Image (tube, rainbow, N blue to C red):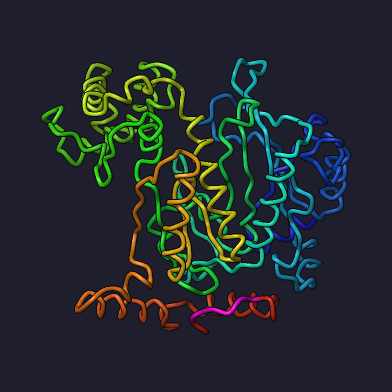
Amino acid sequence: MLDLYVAWMTDPDLCLGVARSNGAYSVNSRYNALHISSRLPKLIDVLVEEGFLEFSQGSFHRDTTAGQNRTSRIKPTPRLLSIFSEFGLESYELDLHHKQECIILTKDEPNEDNDSIRTKVEYEDTPQTIEMRQRLQSYNDFLAATYIDIPSLTDPWITRQKGQGEAQRIPIGQTNKFVRRIFSRGSWCLNGRFYGGWWQQIGKDLRKQITINNEPTVEVDYKGMHVAILSALSDAPPTRGKDRYTLKQQVLPNFSIVEQRTIVKFLVLTAINARDEKSAYRAFRSDQPTGSREKKLKDTELSLFLESFIEENPHLRDDMCSDKGIQLMYLDSQITDRIISSFLDQQRPILTVHDSYIVSTFHVDELSRTMSQASKSVVGKDLDFEQDAPGYSDVIRMRGVDRDRYLSTFRDVFATKDRTPQYQDRLRRFINYRKNTFPDTYWLM
């Protein structure tokens, strides 16, 4: 009922997926801390019969283009909505993640159709998992108390296109902020990245508009992080400021240097994750837009791009097509863990997108120092990073016309006239809910 209420508050057209099989409800699982049992589908059936829920039966189709959904879905009827409308509760006033496990261990197993299915692994706690969970729970509690939004939005969601022209709404609000740390292949040394938070589900252009506690933000990201980590671990000569994906020569005449860089970057990152060259080339093509020239590249042509990259970066030869990506994800998660911990200690909000970090414009200097310290701690070297816009301190250090121009931009960003009335109302309600616990900001409404 709580999930249905929040879904309705977020998007009146939103449905909830519900599992129908008994195997979906393991009462003693650490991933089912509320002990929800297999009686839930029967309860749903009764609510449907009594006119409280609309129900849509799920269907299994191996062909994902068949337009069928594997999971059954439910939605409140007008009868239930008449009850919901009397509550008057904001969705963030409800603890939607009570006892929810945030440290998740997974593995891939074949099903009866020999497809690979990712499943959650039950595990016994260790001092390491307990420490990780406590830190991540503290981070989630801090995020819950932090106001994160996009001021230009009238409604607190965005719509993005999925495959086959299907539209998906992403809630942009205060209930879609829960972060999990997910490890893979049954190992605590593989993956470990932080997943969750609506900012990971939107593009970079929209992320530039994010405000944290009503302050504009800046995103800072490590440059070519996985290649940089591999280079750092191999003791390769320092190449600070160099773009490894820009080759010295043009490989194929029908692709410009700019187009070539895009191909090389995507191909190299794909190759690091692949087990062999053929699977790397196949994966590269499958991710290219239909009808594009990149999708038509043959293995022999792609091998020319990859070999040219290796010739300019010979220390990375053994890392190509080595299935090292998931190990590198663990290392970058360790770096992120240190950065989150540092900001949490200072009670400063930070959002993560794997190898990039979003903070208030007033905290960019602190983020830069922390990123340098974290990379040195994990891989032994200070990795290059870049930011999408100057922070407030950067502007203050400027001189002349540039300084005046950016200060003018700051005034425009802070101007309430550029923020929708709906955003200001959402912020006002959140501040009223948090009352004295809402942090002081550099700019009041």
Does residue 246 sit above or below 13 in this rendering? Answer: above
Figure disc tally: 0
| Dominant secondary-structure state across the stretch colored magenta | loop
The quarter holding residue 381 reads top left
The quarter holding residue 345 reads bottom right
- Indicate yes or no whether the magenta region holds residue 293: no
Does residue 116 sit above or below 125 in this rendering? Answer: above
Left/right of residue 239 with respect to residue 7 in the rendered view: left
Left/right of residue 313 with respect to residue 65 in the rendered view: left
Horizontal and vertical percent position of residue 78: 75, 62
The quarter holding residue 249 reads top left
Quadrant where the N terminus sits is bottom right
Left/right of residue 374 with respect to residue 249 in the rendered view: right
The residue lying at 49 percent from left, 44 percent from top is: 377
Horizontal and vertical percent position of residue 419: 45, 77
State the extent of the magenta-drawn residues as a range: 438-442
The residue lying at 25 percent from left, 80 percent from top is: 404
Does residue 337 sit above or below 391 in this rendering? Answer: above
Q: Which residue appears farthest toward the left when viewing the image?
A: 253
The residue lying at 68 percent from left, 38 percent from top is: 104
Residue closest to the eye, 75 or 9: 9
